[in-house]
Amino acid sequence: MTVTVRFAPSPTGYIHIGNTRTALSNWLFALKNGGRFILRFDDTDIERSKSEYAEAIAQDLDWLGVKPDRVEYQSKRFAIYDAAAERLKSAGLLYPCYETAEELELRRKLRLARRLPPVYGREALKLTDAERAKLEAEGRKPHWRFLLPNFKDDPFSPERTEVHWDDLVRGPQTVDLASMSDPVLVREDGSYLYTFPSVVDDIDLGVTHVIRGDDHVTNTGAQIAIFRALGAEPPQFGHHNLLTTISGEGLSKRTGALSIRALREVGYEPMSVASLAVLIGTSENVIAAPDMQVLAEHFELAAASKSSAKFDPAELDTLNRALVHALDFEAVRGRLAALGIEGDKAEAFWLAVRGNLGRVSDASLWWKIVNEGVQTAPDLSQEDVAFVREAFDLLPAEPWDRQTWKVWTDAVKEKSGRKGKALFMPLRLALTGLPAGPELADLLPVLGREGTLARRP
Ligand code: GLU
């Protein structure tokens, strides 16, 4: 069977680095296993879901390099859920309940007082047709619960019923179905809770592996029971650890914290975001993978640790720097052109400055320095000014290449007797206005003889 995975965000905000971990875990798993990747929007919550967010999520995934084989919207699939719910209803596995939240809370307290587990006691199953009709006549609308298969003959005497799965991340897992309440699958207003449509879709779309955050571990026992109730074999499950902010707070789509959109606008490379999202909180070294193939080689679901991992934006800067240093001109040509960096000098310029940039967009400043002259007046003493003037008289004739810097500074050294920092720093300051920056051996040919002489103090 073809490996089929899905990433199932609710379009209620922009995806953040934590959602990215889930998306990429699925994407890389599919890549490694020759599988298919489905993007499924869990947008059954009509109030909170927005099509703008769905579009933004698709764009952010595309920017990261995730190209879904299929895109589905749960909001367009209600007929399928209704049919599946009807099947469960006729089998007596989905039953109507009329309790209000207050009534349920009261019962919970009573059970606790009687030292019974605080789970739903299935009281609604005892209602006669007449009682139900009476409640409905009073205007009560039912919500619907799934009857967990945790009993032999009598639903009011649940027995320990273990569900097992071998989690792709966490290893063998066991859940006792008698320890939980029958889950509500349909609300009073007829809308579905996430649990049910998700299972129906996973069956209908042929999902073989459900890879998601470990906040869903507790759903898995009930979901496995629902798969079986619908006559399907459950897929394999893998629950990875979650990411938090550096101060340990959970990430939320609603707050926009560490959204992919924001990281992208700041100018990070997609692969540095992807590398960090996938590799932190695992036993793998965090490297800046240049592409998905390389990242896939370093990705192993089982390598994720069991506890949550902190996402440190400073690490992103380090990875981004490493990636930018290695980007060849073709990879950035379009982006540089958009910054106005184009023409004959553009490639040599890029190769000269890339080793000094945190982000591609930082190239703008250096382009300005190269083309318009120093942006900050160099801080040179009288003596240094005299030295630089003398040095400029020794500039070799063109053509210039990478060796020109050495040829020139050797001559300057010989004539002036200066060496080391005293020799190089005034030249750097005169040429760039800044005390640090790209290798001057690379920058000098880009400036050219004329451009260099124009900087004569
Ligand atoms: N919409 C759910 C979420 O965003 C999907 C969970 C799942 O993958 O099953 O948490």
Image (cartoon, helix red, strand yellow):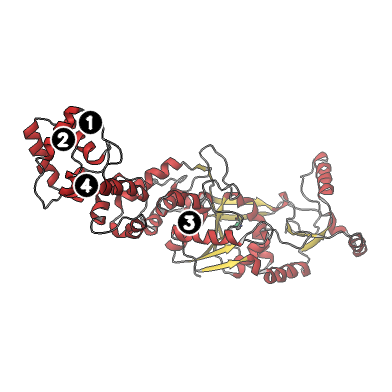
Q: Earlier in the sequence, mark 4 or mark 1?
A: 1
Q: Residues within 10 Å of mark 1 (few under 14, many from 20)?
A: some
Q: How many marks?
A: 4
Q: CA distance from mark 4 to mark 3?
A: 39 Å
Q: Give the left or right position of residue 107, taking residue 400 as reference.
A: right
Q: Which residue is mark 1?
A: 380
Is residue 368 or residue 77 the one in the foreground? Answer: 368
**Which quadrant: the C terminus?**
top left
Front position among marks 4 and 1: 1
Image quadrant of residue 164? bottom right
Q: Position of residue 327 (x, y in %)?
A: 31, 54
Ligand 1: quadrant of the figure: bottom right
Image quadrant of residue 39? bottom right
Is residue 355 or residue 111 the one in the foreground? Answer: 355
Dot 4 and dot 1 residues touching (CB under 8 Å): no
Please, what is the three-letter code of the amino acid marked with disc 3? Leu
Q: Which residue is mark 4?
A: 443
Q: CA distance from mark 3 to mark 1?
A: 51 Å
Q: CA distance from mark 2 to mark 4?
A: 17 Å
Does the Cβ of the disc 1 residue fall within 8 Å of ligand 1? no
Please, what is the three-letter code of the amino acid marked with disc 2? Val
**369 is higher (above) or lower (below) than 5:** above
Front position among marks 3 and 1: 1
Q: Which residue is mark 3?
A: 24
Q: Position of residue 318 (x, y in %)?
A: 37, 43
Front position among marks 4 and 3: 4
Q: Earlier in the sequence, mark 4 or mark 3?
A: 3
Element assignment for label 2: helix
Q: Earlier in the sequence, mark 3 or mark 1?
A: 3
